[in-house]
Image: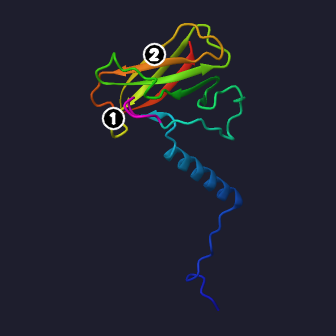
């Protein structure tokens, strides 16, 4: 005869609990390795590449291959500018540039801002840039300057039609 105090019943997860564990694990794992919106100053080239995700629910067929769709606005696609496309003549600190294209244009222009991070990834500043009217499928370059000597990386904070 078995003593019930010595052999506790085995605990088993229900199917919905396993599904929840897998979903949470995938979300956390994806966030840890998502660097598509971060870059170092223009002295080094960008790692940003166009990525198509099965989670996207809007039409991405209009987006050039080297651009990525902007998650909160299906009218906007962007990429970090290359070092050849970035001119830092204004800034004595660091600068970054982003190339933006819109499917339908932005009649009142584009507004964009970046978060500026130190070498530890802590946000220490921000800056922004704007354009005038942008026609559909016209590429624009937005340049972001900082004089903050601790600036190491940048991360897109917002891009929108103004």
Q: How many other residues sit within 10 Å of disc 2, few (<14), some (14-19) or many (≥20)?
A: some
Q: Which residue is mark 1?
A: 118
Please, which residue is most extreme toward the front here? 84
Of mark 1 and mark 2, the one earlier in the sequence is 1
- Between 53 and 41, the one lying in front of the other is 41
- Span shown in magenta: 40-46
Magenta span: chief secondary structure: loop
Quadrant of the rendered structure where residue 124 is? top left
In the rendered view, tell whether residue 93 sits above or below residue 14.
Answer: above
- Residue 130, compared with residue 35, is above or below; it is above
User: For this view, does 71 lie left or right of residue 126?
Assistant: right
Farthest bottom residue? 1
Task: Quarter of the image for the C terminus: give it.
Answer: top right
Coordinates of residue 96 in the picture (x, y in percent): 41, 25
Where disc 1 sits, the SS reads loop
Residue 154 % position (x, y): 41, 30
Task: Please state, as top left, top right, bottom left or bottom right, where the N terminus lies in the image.
Answer: bottom right
Q: Which residue is mark 2?
A: 129
State which quadrant residue 107 falls in.
Answer: top right
Spatial CA span between label 1 and label 2: 20 Å
Asked if 32 appears above or below 73 in the picture, the reply is below
Dot 2: element: strand
């Amino acid at each position: 005869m078995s003593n019930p105090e010595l052999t506790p019943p085995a605990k088993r997860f229900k199917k919905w609990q396993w599904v929840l564990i897998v979903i949470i694990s995938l979300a956390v794992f994806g966030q840890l390795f998502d660097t598509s919106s971060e870059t170092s100053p223009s002295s080094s080239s960008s790692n940003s590449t166009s990525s198509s995700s099965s989670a996207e629910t809007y039409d991405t067929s209009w987006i050039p291959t080297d651009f990525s769709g902007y998650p909160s606005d299906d009218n906007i696609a962007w990429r970090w500018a290359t070092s050849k496309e970035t001119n830092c003549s204004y800034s004595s600190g660091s600068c970054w540039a982003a190339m933006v294209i819109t499917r339908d244009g932005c009649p009142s222009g584009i507004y964009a801002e970046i978060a500026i991070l130190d070498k530890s990834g802590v946000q220490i500043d921000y800056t922004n840039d704007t354009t005038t009217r942008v026609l559909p499928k016209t590429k624009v370059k937005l340049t972001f300057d900082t004089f903050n000597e601790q600036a190491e990386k940048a991360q897109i904070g917002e891009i929108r039609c103004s």
